Image (cartoon, rainbow, N blue to C red):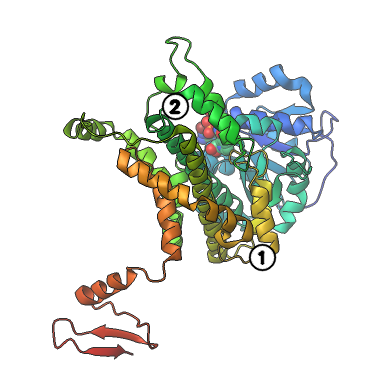
């Protein structure tokens, strides 16, 4: 690595051409679209990919969209960027990201900044930040959401790293980010170290919950309500005009309307019913377990995907317990049921977001990140997959009280949940009685009910733990820690 930290002229030594403001390496679908977005916003961008063909294709197909400096080697790439350099990596997360960093470092100078826009695990980001800091290089772990369309036309960007790095990186990210309805850029410095990737991870976890709740709504409306996919598409389109308005609800209407060209069947009927996952839902749940935050909606959504893939078990149980031909179907008035499912969906969604924001708050506490939760809700209002009208309400709630105990008790959401409770119970009961599973609805309702209970059966669990393992317990009537001599005279002793 070069040790110089001085700045240099902003033209290349041999060409006299202006140097790039930013470089981007990793030109698969996300990277090339982000590079085009950056170029379209007037930034000169150096572009590089391990396999040269992708760089060539980008320049050939889109080179006229802005000022690109293609590079065929890492050295040439790094040298074409003005110092202190900002270099964005958009490669597969994990080992490829480390490999790219290792290749870049020998050519970098102190003060240069590496921005990782891939879906890195936040602990990798913390490690990379520390390792590169020892070399005088800033590392900015950045969550990018919005898929390939967002990358091109404006994603939601969750930037980590130091304040100093954000001063250089922030304006570029804000210029390419999606704009919310009020014109604000959906990009922010969410915190230092791994904060950007942590927030992106929880975003994806909430996305899992959102999609599972939508899928359960569809299943209930079809299997219990008797509606056809095209009719359910109309229901979702109608829901998208109210408080549920969101990208995923809108997309659901679109997908359910779609008819398969080969078979003439609803498209949803020709897709294999085994949901895949790339791992961010699992990471969210693993982190939540470590932090002790009950993200039940996200966990149910993640397990529901796993269950869908266990085709052998599904077949075995389906054959062992066939539908009883004499079973009385649960009868519902479809019109009433549509409204009940909407209310259940809304209340469950509020729970999923409340849990996700609890997890971000807990992660921030654990890692010493100053994350402004209202700001997070703000930058999710456009560009990202979970963009939704009601994120405005979450921003308002955190603006009124940045240290909220839970979103559920804020006036707007408390009112919404209160109004939804009867329908929510009806839908969960209907799901159980009809044998149409709705695990995310059920667990969200159970979470809400558990929080409301005056006394929880956790008291019995404590008593059992003390009985079999002398794990002690606290009493409701006086302070201290106690143990009962269960196998002796059952007298109680206070523990020191
Ligand atoms: P991929 O995740 O499919 O990664 C492909 C890119 O990684 C190619 O440029 C490939 O170079 C490069 N690469 C690999 Br693989 N191993 C490498 C190595 N050892 N050294 C150098 N380069 C290497 O691309 P993507 O779907 O565009 O996603 C890019 C990043 O953005 C990922 O981290 C992804 O998780 C994240 N992300 C994706 C989305 C989405 O919706 N797809 C959304 C948000 C974030 P090659 O061309 O030479 O093989």
Task: Relative to 255, say whether 172 is above or below.
Answer: below
Residue at x 36%, y 35% (from the top left corner): 331
Give the residue at mark 1. 401
Give the residue at mark 2. 227
Q: Pointer 1: residues within 10 angstroms few (<14), some, or many (20+)? A: few
Left or right position of 194 against 443: right
Give the residue furthest to the top.
Answer: 262
Left or right position of 491 against 34: left
- Regarding ligand 1, which quadrant of the image does it lie in? top right
Label 2 sits on a secondary structure element that is loop
Q: Is residue 221 visible?
A: yes
Label 1 sits on a secondary structure element that is loop
Given residues 353 and 126, the one toward you in this image is: 353
Residue at x 50%, y 24% (from the top left corner): 231
Q: Quadrant of residue 129?
A: bottom right
Asked if ligand 1 lies within 8 A of label 1, the reply is no
Residue at x 28%, y 71% (from the top left corner): 460
Q: Pointer 2: residues within 10 angstroms few (<14), some, or many (20+)? A: some
Left or right position of 183 against 147: right
Task: Relative to 350, say whether 88 is above or below.
Answer: above
Residue 105, x across and y down, in percent: 62, 45
Q: Is residue 147 visible?
A: no
């Amino acid at each position: 690595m070069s040790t110089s930290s001085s700045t240099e002229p902003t033209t290349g030594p041999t060409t006299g051409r202006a140097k790039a403001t930013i470089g981007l390496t990793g030109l698969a679908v996300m990277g090339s679209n982000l590079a085009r977005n950056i170029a379209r916003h007037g930034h000169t961008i150096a572009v590089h990919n391990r396999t040269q063909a992708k760089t060539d294709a980008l320049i050939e197909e889109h080179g006229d969209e802005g000022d690109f400096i293609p590079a065929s080697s890492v050295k040439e790439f790094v040298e074409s960027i003005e110092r202190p350099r900002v270099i964005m990596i958009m490669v597969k997360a994990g080992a490829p990201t480390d490999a790219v960093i290792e290749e870049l470092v020998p050519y970098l100078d102190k003060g240069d900044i590496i921005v990782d826009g891939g879906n890195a695990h936040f602990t990798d980001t913390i490690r990379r930040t520390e390792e590169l800091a020892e070399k005088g290089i800033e590392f900015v772990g950045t969550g990018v959401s919005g898929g390939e369309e967002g990358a091109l036309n404006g994603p939601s960007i969750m930037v980590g790293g130091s304040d100093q790095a954000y001063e250089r990186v922030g304006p570029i990210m804000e210029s390419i980010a999606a704009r919310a309805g009020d014109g604000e850029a959906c990009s922010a410095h969410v915190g230092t170290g791994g904060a950007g990737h942590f927030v992106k991870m929880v975003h994806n976890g909430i996305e899992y919950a959102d999609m599972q709740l939508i899928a359960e709504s569809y299943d209930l409306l079809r299997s219990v309500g008797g509606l056809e996919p095209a009719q359910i598409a109309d229901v979702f389109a109608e829901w998208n005009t109210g408080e549920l308005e969101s990208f995923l609800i809108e997309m659901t209407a679109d997908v359910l309307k779609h008819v398969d060209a080969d078979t003439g069947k609803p498209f949803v009927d020709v897709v294999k019913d085994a949901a895949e996952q790339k791992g961010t839902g699992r990471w969210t749940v693993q982190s939540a377990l470590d932090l002790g935050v009950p993200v039940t909606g996200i966990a149910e959504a993640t397990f529901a995907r796993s269950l869908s893939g266990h085709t052998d078990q599904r077949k075995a149980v389906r054959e062992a317990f066939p539908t009883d031909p004499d079973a009385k179907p649960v009868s519902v008035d479809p019109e009433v049921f549509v409204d009940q499912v909407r209310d259940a969906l809304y209340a469950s969604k509020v729970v999923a977001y409340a849990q996700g924001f609890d997890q971000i708050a807990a992660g921030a506490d654990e890692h010493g990140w100053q994350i402004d939760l209202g700001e997070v809700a703000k930058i999710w209002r456009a560009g990202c997959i979970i963009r939704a009208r009601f994120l405005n309400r979450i921003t308002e709630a955190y603006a009124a009280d940045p240290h909220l105990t839970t979103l559920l008790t804020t006036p707007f959401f408390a009112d919404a949940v209160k109004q939804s409770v009867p329908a929510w119970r009806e839908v969960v009961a209907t799901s159980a009685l009809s044998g149409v599973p709705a695990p995310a609805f059920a667990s969200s309702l159970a979470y809400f009910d558990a929080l409301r209970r005056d006394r929880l059966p956790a008291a019995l669990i404590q008593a059992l733990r003390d009985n079999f393992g002398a794990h002690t317990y606290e009493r409701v009537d006086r302070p201290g820690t106690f143990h009962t001599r269960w196998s002796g005279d059952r007298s109680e002793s206070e523990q020191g």
